[in-house]
Each structure stands twice: as C-alpha cells, then as structure tokens.
Image (cartoon, grey):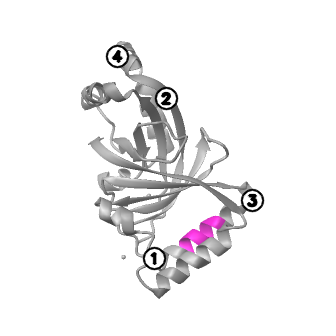
Amino acid sequence: MKKLIYIFTFLLSFSLSAQDLYWYDVFLDVKNQNAKAFENAVDKFYSSVDFPEGVTMTFSNIALKGQGFKETHILSFVSSTSTSLADFRSSLSGEEWEKYLDGLRPYINSARTSAGNASNLYNEEEFNPIGQAWAFKVKNKDIPTFTDAFKTAMETIEFPGFVGLARVTHGLSNGENLIIYGTYSNLNDAFTFENPKNEAEAKAFGEFFNVTGDISEFTQTWTRVKIKDYQ
C-alpha cells in the first residue's frame, strides 16, 4: 500500500487500478542562491512530522520546464482517501508550523497550490525518481472521451514506469484541468519515451492524438527529480 501511495506529487506490462488517489501539490519558486538552505529547511521540518497511515509526501526539484514556468520545487502530498489528505493538511498548524513558514519566506519568491484526484493508474509499483507531467485543457463534456482514448492507448504502449491520468479540481492554471503523469528510472528513459518502440505503439500514439486533438489543447510539460520521500 505504501508504494501505491507514492504515485503523485499533480504533481504519472500495465495493470489497471480501480482505486483513485487524491493529491495536493505545493509549487515554490526558490531563489537560486537559497536552494540548498531551502531544501534543508523543508527536510528538517517534514522529517519530524508524524505522517498518518496512507499519506505520503514527495519533495522534488523541477529540473526541466518550459518558458513561463517559474517554480523550482514541488511538495506533492498524496493519499488514497480525500478525508485523510484533508485531515493531514488541516493538522499542519500551530507554533512549529508557523516557525517553519517564517523560516522559508526569505528563501522563496512565490508559491502556489493545486489539488485533484488521479485514476486510470498503471505500473503502480514503478514510481520512479524522475516524473514528467503533460498538461491539457479539456472541456468538461469531453473529459470522458479523453479518458477513454488514454485507456485505449495504454493497452498497447509500454510505458517504462508508473503512468496515470489526473484531474485538476483546485488551483487550475490557465484552464489546464487534465494531466498525464509518468515516471522514469533514469534520464535516458525520459529522453527516449516519445519514440515509439514498434509499429503498434506508433499506431496507438497516432490514434490517441487523432481522438484528443480536436477536444483538447496541450499546454505544457515539466519534469521533476525526487529529492526525498516522507511517510
């Protein structure tokens, strides 16, 4: 169960899971000269936190991103239930919490949050240290069609790690409401994934984009590298 919970930070042979995951992401723009001090402060605080069963946090830096994406780090909280995630977030309060926040403020330029739920999860035991998010704008009425196209593609595409489809329900940025998130064990896998390995995969990619091209707008992709897990 612990390995299953690691899946998000939305911040993606396949075996489908019927269980949704709930996630709460904190994106932070950290001043370059303060990155190490910031990372040490985050680690010190969350290493002392008593995480309840079923809730985890992954701390990562955002190593690759497009123009206009200014955040440098992400804290991804994940749980198999919305109640446990909400209760844990509410528990982050009091004197020690305020001291932690006060200590971080000099290191950061800005922060933002988003939350949602993830379903249609594959390779759940392969939540690797490098993760990539592909963000899309999709009208609500077209989300089922997009979801079905994703599931159909995953019947053929052999992704090298975990992959899943997430819906952003809070903290949308410029209308992005669906994210495909996948993980890789190393940079080589990340660099080569979008090259189909055979004719069947090429056809699956093509059919996915044919179906989703008219109902979605691909907006951006970004890649994070794990610093540490907490549980």
The disc, 3 or 4, on the residue closer to the chain's N-terminal end is 4
Q: Secondary structure at mark 3?
A: helix
Q: Secondary structure at mark 1?
A: loop
Circle 1 residues within 10 Å: few <14, some 14–19, many ≥20: some
- How far is mark 3 from mark 4, CA to CA? 44 Å
The residue shown at (52%, 41%) is: 69
Mark pair 1, 3: CA separation = 26 Å
To which residue does mark 4 refer? 103
Residue receiving disc 2: 111
Q: CA distance from mark 1 to mark 2?
A: 35 Å
Q: Residue at x 67, y 67 (%)?
A: 213
Q: Check disc 4 and give the amino acid type.
A: Gly
Taking the spot 47% from the left edge, 61% from the top edge, the residue there is 164
Mark 3 vs mark 2, CA separation in Å: 31 Å
Q: Nearer the viewer, mark 3 or mark 4?
A: 4
Q: State the residue position of label 3.
A: 141
Q: Which of the 4 image quarters holds residue 207?
A: bottom right
> Does the segment drawn in magenta span residue 75?
no
Amino acid carrying label 3: it is Lys
Q: Are marks 1 and 3 in contact (CB under 8 Å)?
A: no
Question: Which residue bears the numbered disc 1?
Answer: 157
Q: Nearer the viewer, mark 3 or mark 2?
A: 2
Secondary element at image label 2: strand
- Can residue 123 be seen here? The reply is no
